[in-house]
Every structure is written in C-alpha cells, then in structure tokens.
Amino acid sequence: MKQARVLNDKELRTVLNSTKLTRYQHRNRLMVMLSYCAGLRACEIASLRIGDVMGSNGEAKHTILLERWQTKGAQRQQAVVSEKLRKEITQYIREHRAKAPAGAPLLASQKGGAFSSQTIQQVFRQLYEQVGMDGASSHSGRRTMLTKLAERGVHARVIQQIARHSSLATTQRYIEVSPHLLRNAVEML
C-alpha cells in the first residue's frame, strides 16, 4: 500500500489557504490542523466531541483523551495538543460552536450531525484535489507531523508516543527520509 504524501511547508500553507475557498472554511481548516498538529486519524477527527477538546474554563485542553471507541486500535489513548492548535480550537468553538453542548460533534456536518471517517477522508481528498496535490490523503497531515518531528531531531520513542503506535517499527514507516534529512545527519559528524 502506498504511503500518504508528506507535505512541505509551502504545500501545507497551500492546503490551509485552500480551505478559505470552501463553503465551510473554518471547519475544514480545523480538520487539517487536527491532522497536522495533533496527528489525529480521520476516524479520530470524526469522533471528536466538543467536550473532548474543551475544558469547563472555555479553553481548549492540553490533552485530548480518546476513548476506545474513538481510536483505530480500540484502546484508550491521549493526544497532546500544541498551543497553536489549542488557539485554533478555542477560536473555532467560540465563533462557530459556542451554543453547542459538550456532547455535540466538534466538526458538524452540513445537517449538524457527526461526520463519518469516510466523509472526513472525502473532505481531505477534495481539498488536495482542489490544489492539485497527487498522493495526498487524510493521513498526509499525520505523516507530515511525524516526519517534521524526526527532521528536528525528536527521538523516535517520543515520536512513537505522539503517534500513539504500539510498535516503533510502525512509527519508523511513517517517517519519510528526505535528502535534506540525510544531509543534516552527515553534517553532524
């Protein structure tokens, strides 16, 4: 099976800018940010409820607790949320979901209900097609995040924990080895 495309910084900006051209630009931007900044899978993004990401203080949580039914491996897991993503979540909820209860979907469909994993994947596919990016999918944000962490020297075991993989070998398959990464490695000597 072919791996999802890893995006460079310019491509990521292009995708984020392309969300402005969609009918639900803020929702679609947050969808991309959840994939790229938290490494969430489509099934996890689809299952998120407002209470999963927002605290009672009206601010986004530092950690998203994913219940067994929300994850790929049917195991309870935690996703760490960066300050950048926390700001995005807080702003999105204040502007678009402020009156929704904690049990409501974070990203609501046109009819107000929850998305399915397949629909989230379809939205990603449309965003990437809109900008002409072949080989990109809902997993591109996740692979991009993990690859960028490796390029910045984050230890593989830390990346494994962030990815919520039980096997380090799985994490290593996600990380794309670029010529830039190889050059930086040999320059360390």
Image (spheres, rainbow, N blue to C red):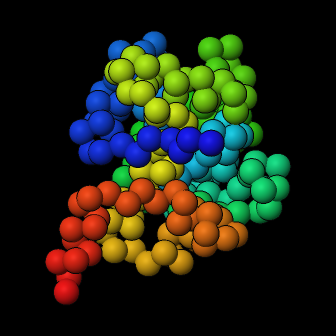
Judging depth in this view, the residue of 150 and 54 nearest the camera is 150
Q: Is residue 11 above or below residue 61?
A: above
| Rendering coords of residue 104 (x, y %) | 71, 34
Looking at the figure, which quarter contains the N terminus? top right
All told, the count of numbered labels is: 0
Outermost residue toward the bottom in this view: 189
Q: Quadrant of residue 176?
A: bottom left
Is residue 124 toward the left or the right of residue 134 in the image?
right
| Rendering coords of residue 161 (x, y %) | 58, 71
* Residue 33 visible in the current orientation: no
Residue at image position (45%, 13%) is 23
Q: Is residue 16 above or below residue 64?
A: above
| Rendering coords of residue 58 (x, y %) | 53, 49
Q: Is residue 12 above or below residue 130?
A: below
| Rendering coords of residue 178 (x, y %) | 32, 57
Judging depth in this view, the residue of 110 and 59 nearest the camera is 110
Looking at the figure, which quarter contains the C terminus? bottom left
* Residue 66 visible in the current orientation: yes
Residue at image position (74%, 51%) is 71
Residue at image position (35%, 32%) is 16
Q: Quadrant of residue 41?
A: top right
